[in-house]
Image (cartoon, grey):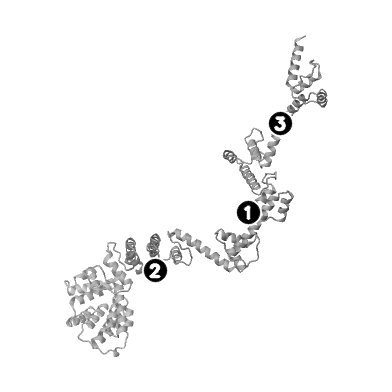
Amino acid sequence: MGKESQNRLKHFAALKSKYQATQYQDSSPASLLYLILRKLDLGIELLDLESNWLQEHELFETLEIIWLEQFRMGESKRLEAEFSHLKAKYKVANNWESSVDNFLYPILWKVDSENSLNDSEVKLLQENNLTQIVTIAQDIKRFAELKDKYQATKYQDSHPDSRLYRILKKLDTEASLNDNEYEWLLNNELFEAIEISEKQDSATRAKVTQLKSKYQASQHPDTSLSSQLYKILQKFDADEKLIDSEIDWLESQGLTETIALAEDLERKREFIALKVKYKAGQYEDLSPDNYLYTILKKLDSETHLNEQDINFLRQSQLPETTEIANDKYAFILKSKIVSGVIISDSEIDWLRNNEYEDIIILYQKKHFAALKRKYGLVDPSLPLEPFYAIMVKLEKKERLDPKFVFQLMEEGLLSNDREIALAYYRLEAEFYEQELGRTGHKWNIATASGYWRKANEPERALKLTNIDLNRVNDSNLKSAILVTRGAAFRDSHKLDDAEDCAKKAMEYQPDSHQPYTLMGAICYDRHDYEQGNYWFEQAIQRGAEIKDIDAEIKRVIRSTKNEEKQHKAAEYLLKKDSQRYAWAKSYL
């Protein structure tokens, strides 16, 4: 026998052993079995006649092996088909890789079989933008939990697209099923779920009745679980705030008692929040009618607490709340000060009583700066005292001590033309006018008029002195009124009227130097210096001080607007007495 024949015999024997066909007696390579086994070993699909031949010769084990081998040869295609099915089922994009060795295949298989994923698998899906699979897996898990809860596990479909999932989710919100949903459960013989649903509906309706009673809405006829009333009462019971449209609905249904309860609950919620915010949690009473609620609302609205409020906080042993209230009010006052608002004496007293000295100092500095601007005190080195106290008094229209004012003027700290001095004169004028009205004492006319002139308001002096002198019995008073009235006319540059007043004053009081001093000043205003000197000499003879006369002359020259006339007046005075009028050199 040749080598080729020997090899064929060995090969046939090996194939018979491999495919469990050793019981077949014919060992010749010419046997049809050899051909069949060779084709099988090469993965060639057998023909029907070949399969029939194996059956005829009762080679059943060989046939089974052949069937398994053919099944194995189609496994790759089946795996790909199953992967495609899972991708479609779990909504994976078509462009995703379809190879069965992809990580996605075992994950989808696990989701489909075990309905769960571990953390690393979830992370892997999220990193590859496959979050929809995570969501579906969560829904599947939830679906399984709901089927177990509502005894519907015999329903085989576990995908969240199932109608059962939608029904069970609805049941889990305690909502009632509609007729179609009820019928669907019935058709699928899910009787346990139906029974649970009916018990749940019964319990929920009882709850609706209980809630209506609890929140004083029993008169409303609707007991539906889907009603607006039930939704509102559920919010009530969950201690949630009602929105305006819900309050409006209750009002439209005439449920005023329910609205009152809602408002009461809202106040309680606000009260609790305010107690936490202002550290009054140890106060146990939660009634909105409690005085503490009113205090905390005032505090929250930036309203200053009064003494009664503070005393209540102290008596209730709420020191932290008291401190917060004080600090908050102090901050409000400080903000007003920084904004340039003038605070009241009572507010300053409050700051002082509660030891906020730093804010008082800040206020005084800011107020002092504002008052300095108002009263024309531009010197940055000007001390706070006594000027701040003076200006505060003037602002309050409180009179100053005249001696103190004159002392400041003599020390050069105040000048007559400064606003602070004018304010002082104005205040004095108003005081003496008030005294005139209070007492009827007419000497106050002359005094007030003099202050109005010093305040640079001659028209007020003229108005005040415009009286019928025939009704004044005292000649000296008549003269004094005429002198101050004439001086006011002179201030208003009405020199003829001023002269008339001076001459009439001389008639009423010929021995007084004041009418003559007025006449001298009028003549100097007219630049008639010789005639003016005459009247000034008459005044000196009647008791006028030379220094006062010289001061009046100096004022006239200083107030002359025409420089040429100033120059001529200075020349005249220096020629008359260069030593006495040495100050006039400054006008040359």
For disc 1, the neighbor class at 10 Å (few under 14, some 14 to 19, many from 20) is: few
Residue 241 screen position, x and y as percent? 55, 60
1 and 3 marks in contact (CB < 8 Å):
no
Viewer-proximal residue among 173 and 151: 151
378 versus 83 height, above or below:
below
Residue 305 is left or right of residue 244, and the answer is left
Q: Residue at x 38, y 68 (%)?
A: 307
Residue 75 is marked as 3
Amino acid type at mark 3: Glu
Amino acid type at mark 1: Thr
Q: Which residue was labeled with disc 2?
A: 308
Amino acid type at mark 2: Gln
Residue 414 screen position, x and y as percent? 26, 69
Indicate the secondary structure of the residue bearing disc 2.
helix
Residue 211 screen position, x and y as percent? 60, 62
Residue 268 is left or right of residue 155, and the answer is left
Inspect this view and state whether residue 561 appears.
no
Residue 541 is left or right of residue 194, and the answer is left
Q: Which part of the image, by quadrant, shows the N terminus?
A: top right
Residue 399 screen position, x and y as percent? 29, 74
Mark positioned earlier in the residue sequence (1 or 2): 1
Viewer-proximal residue among 322 and 282: 282
Indicate the secondary structure of the residue bearing disc 3.
helix
Whole-angstrom CA distance, mark 2 to mark 3, is 91 Å
In this view, the mark in front (1 or 3): 1
Residue 258 is marked as none
Viewer-proximal residue among 11 and 460: 11
Q: Which residue was labeled with disc 1?
A: 173
Q: Residue at x 68, y 51 (%)?
A: 167
Indicate the secondary structure of the residue bearing disc 1.
loop
48 versus 215 height, above or below:
above
